[in-house]
Amino acid sequence: MSHSIPKPGAPVRGSKTGKPIMALFDLLGRSWALGVIWQLSEDGLTFRDLQKRCEGVSPTVLNKRLKELRECALVDHDGTGYVLTAMGQELFGLLQPFGRWSENWSETVFGSKTRRRPD
């Protein structure tokens, strides 16, 4: 499978026609993509700080993910660190309810409570 950045209109995982939603899901489904967005949702972070927050991510994977997220206009570098763009912040706002929903799902289906990050 090609490791190019998923783009609407081109074949992506799950869609031969590259529907925009499928291109987005392909991008977000890559290792650490959602983690990077989640970690940058509160504040900008240097590469080193972001790597610490994304426990266990290799520098190579983090660099690749940041490059992809930057090319897709979700993340930028403001001179002091990586930040979500306005579009990245909007996406996080849409994803945030999934965090709350997943807590309920985890407890209801699996009987497990997890430490919840403040909203």
Image: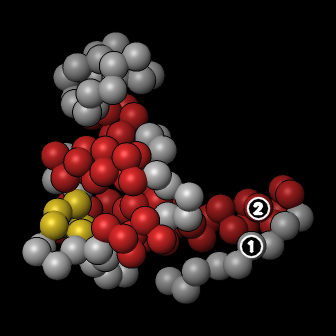
| Residue 40 in sight | no
**Residue 98 appears in which quarter of the rendering?**
bottom right
Residue type at mark 1? Thr
Which residue is at a point 22% across and 29% down the rendered structure image?
8
Q: Which residue: 84% across, 56% down? A: 109
Residue on which disc 1 sits? 114
Seen from this angle, which residue lies furthest left? 79
Q: Which mark is residue 22?
A: none
Tell me the SS state at disc 1. loop
Q: Are marks 2 and 1 in contact (CB under 8 Å)?
A: yes
Left or right of residue 113, residue 96 in this image: left
Identify the residue under disc 2.
106
Toward the right, the furthest residue is 111
Q: Please report whichever mark, 2 or 1, sits nearer to the chain's N-terminal start.
A: 2
Residue visible at 22% across and 60% down in the picture: 75
Q: Position of residue 49 (x, y in %)?
A: 39, 75
Which of these two is toward me, 25 or 68? Answer: 68
- Alpha carbons under labels 2 and 1: distance apart: 8 Å
**31 and 101: which is toward the camera:** 31
Q: Is residue 17 above or below residue 82?
A: above
